[in-house]
Image (tube, helix red, strand yellow):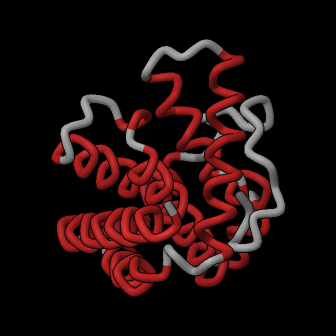
Amino acid sequence: MSSNDNDTPLDPESVHPDALDPATYHRVVGPALQAAAETAAKRGHKYLFDDMPAMLALVDMVTRLADLYREHYPEVATDKADLIDRAATAACVMVFQEAELPPDAIGQCLAALETAYGQVNEQAVLDPGVRYIAMAWSHLDDDERKDAHHCLTQACEHIIAAIETWQSEIH
């Protein structure tokens, strides 16, 4: 899932979850993953992978944090552009591997997630989380992890609420 146009397919073979260097992971993937997993748990999901709205929130948070990373650190991001572009895929693969899904199931889940993300992104369903993700980025940039976590949790909750409202309106 590249940028917000999402023209890069989620391919489990295209990125290894450990491919991101620790600094990038610490700023782009880790905080979003923690917020999404905790929010899914609060919603009664033992595993993040079985909460589709939380997974969509994870993809959006990582995608937007990656975009902000590229924007604020273009010289660093250029060297690892491909890895940053695939950060959302890496995060999802980690979630699915943690759940011990077989590789073919991971591919199917990634495809379903990509399709769903394309729909909600195209219809601006995810927009309620944007400002919280931007605030989280500012906190991450200042190494204020607790404040960043709070903002990402807020983003996740707002995104999930927007997805669930949208789903109820179309069904």
How far from the left and from the top, in percent, is residue 107?
A: 71, 28
* Residue drawn at x 74%, y 57% as measured from the top left: 80
From the viewer's side, name the closer residue of 141 and 154. 154
On screen, residue 87 versus residue 133, left or right, reads right
* Residue drawn at x 70%, y 70% as measured from the top left: 3
Q: Is residue 90 above or below residue 134?
A: above
| Quarter of the figure with residue 11 | top right
* Residue drawn at x 64%, y 83% as measured from the top left: 71
| Quarter of the figure with residue 155 | bottom left
On screen, residue 55 versus residue 16, left or right, reads left
| Quarter of the figure with residue 110 | top right
Q: Is residue 29 above or below residue 129?
A: above
Residue found at the far front of this picture? 171
On screen, residue 104 versus residue 151, left or right, reads right
* Residue drawn at x 81%, y 56% as measured from the top left: 8
On screen, residue 159 versus residue 9, left or right, reads left
From the viewer's side, name the closer residue of 126 and 12. 126
Image quarter of the N terminus: bottom right
How far from the left and from the top, in percent, is residue 14?
A: 80, 37
From the viewer's side, name the closer residue of 131 and 127. 127
How far from the left and from the top, in percent, is residue 151?
A: 27, 74
Q: Total of numbered circles in the picture?
A: 0
How far from the left and from the top, in percent, is residue 111?
A: 72, 40
